[in-house]
Amino acid sequence: MLGASLTLLNRSDTVPFEPDEFGNVAEETRLKYRYIDLRRPALAQALVLRHKVCKTMRDVLDAKGFLEIETPFLTKSTPEGARDFLVPSRMQQGEFYALPQSPQLFKQILMIGGLDKYFQIVRCFRDEDLRADRQPEFTQLDVEMAFVCEDDIIDMTTDVLRAVCALADRPFPDEVRRISYAEAMDAYGTDRPDMRYEMLLHDVGEIVADCEFKVFSGAVASGGLVKALAAPGGGAFTRKVIDGYTDFAIEYGAKGLAWCKLADGAFTGTPAKFLSQPVQAKLREVCGASDGDIIFFVADTPAKTNRVLGALRNKLGADMNLYDDRAFAWCWVTDWPLVEWNEDQQRWDSLHHPFTSPRPEDVEKLDSDPGSATARAYDIVCNGVELGGGSIRIHNSGVQQKMFSLLGISAEDAQDRFGFLLDALRFGAPPHGGIALGLDRIVMMLCGAASLREVIAFPKTQRGTCPLTDAPAAVDDKQLAELNLKIIAPPTS
């Protein structure tokens, strides 16, 4: 093809960077000139995949008879967990809307209204501290169904995820493993287990309860937990490497990190001389350790022991290349506790949210023993990352009021914040449940991206700012006056 003429459509200034200079350009600069960065093939391909993921989710759910229904963005503040983004009302001065943290209450009301299958690809907003896998505004696939049990939600979600993974040629198992919350905490130290590799945690409290190493025996005597994990080949770790892992454990709240190396059938390390041969043999057996390995120990409260050793397991897995980066290991975490005791505030907190139903046989425990009540909740986890979570909801107004009371929400406060839901539940609410899947996280994992900012067209920084538009920004006095607002400068120290 030969052109008959050449027309200049537009001119371009010298670009601040070339799109292929990705690794040499500060992220702040790339976000400021996002229109240049969007020309980068990897980012453009991620956005194409994101579109295909959304379309596939819609197609799968449409084929199953779901309706995509929009819910309000300007709603009432019902703070529970993260802080709300507030929007002042000009017409109702002194009052505020809130941007929704999720459509949770509206989708439950849709079920009460007889719309039995709902979904929505929806933006949600949370004013919380940010990190690599969080944004102040994010997108989720939100789903709710009436007259269902846990298996119905899990089966539907599995079908959606299988179709989505096929878009990126990622394998998806015929059947996703299910593991209880208790099993996950016991073996992995976290409710988000990475199952791409073994190296499990082992409770060794009974083995060391009477040993002469007071760190271990003292923890057991005081009701604490002693756990161990064996790192294969870790006997080659230098003292500098071990000190680095000790510092890491301390960052997660540990008082220290005990360790023993195995060589020639014997233990070496500080605890070794306090551990009898039978104890050493039992530790070797329980931990599945061999000569050339290292066993790490943490002795503390159950929560801290699991948190520290679970984090250490994840770090060791990455540092020692114990898994294939392209492998996907899925699991459902089920049978969650309904509530947990908040020692600092001396109250019960929901592990999911206040609208999660206990098992029917556990409803009476809300009055007598709430800590032993099991929630009808489930999370989907892949490679140690929670990609979504859901539950069967409370559909009885009396049980919902009882749940609020357990969480320290008075009847008056509950009516003020959630009265519209409590009222709706009194009009024949059906059993219902649902799930929310993090769209940004799913696309990030399918792309192998290191950050959510690599799969969102116009993301915020970790400080919650937009370098492209300079948001958030000051507004003029006229706008403030229309809202009857005044900026008060923070006190100087």
Image: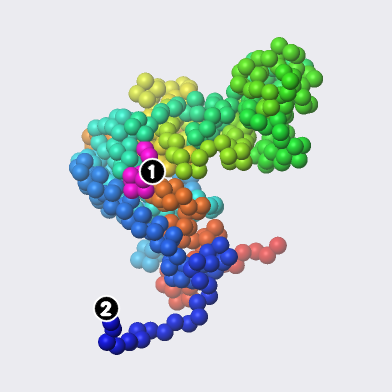
User: Quick one: quadrant of the C terminus?
Assistant: bottom right
Give, as a three-letter code, the residue at label 1: Arg
Other residues around mark 1 within 10 Å, as few (<14) / some (14–19) / many (≥20): some
Q: In the visual, does 47 lie left or right of 68?
A: right
Picture coordinates of residue 380 (x, y %)? 41, 37
Of the two numbered discs 2 and 1 on the same chain, state the one appearing first in sequence. Answer: 2
Distance from disc 2 to disc 1, alpha carbons, whole Å, reads 40 Å
User: Quick one: quadrant of the N terminus?
Assistant: bottom left
Give, as a three-letter code, the residue at label 2: Met
Q: Residue furthest front?
A: 1
Q: Is residue 323 magenta?
A: no
Tag 2's secondary structure? loop
Tag 1's secondary structure? loop
In front: mark 2 or mark 1? 2
Other residues around mark 2 within 10 Å, as few (<14) / some (14–19) / many (≥20): few
Query: Which residue lies at the image location 75% right of the left edge and 14% below the top edge?
Result: 276
Specify the segment rendered in magenta: 164-172
The residue carrying mark 2 is 1
Q: In the visual, does 356 lie left or right of 200?
A: left
Mark number displayed over residue 170: 1
Query: Which residue lies at the image location 38% right of the left edge and 43% below the top edge?
Result: 170
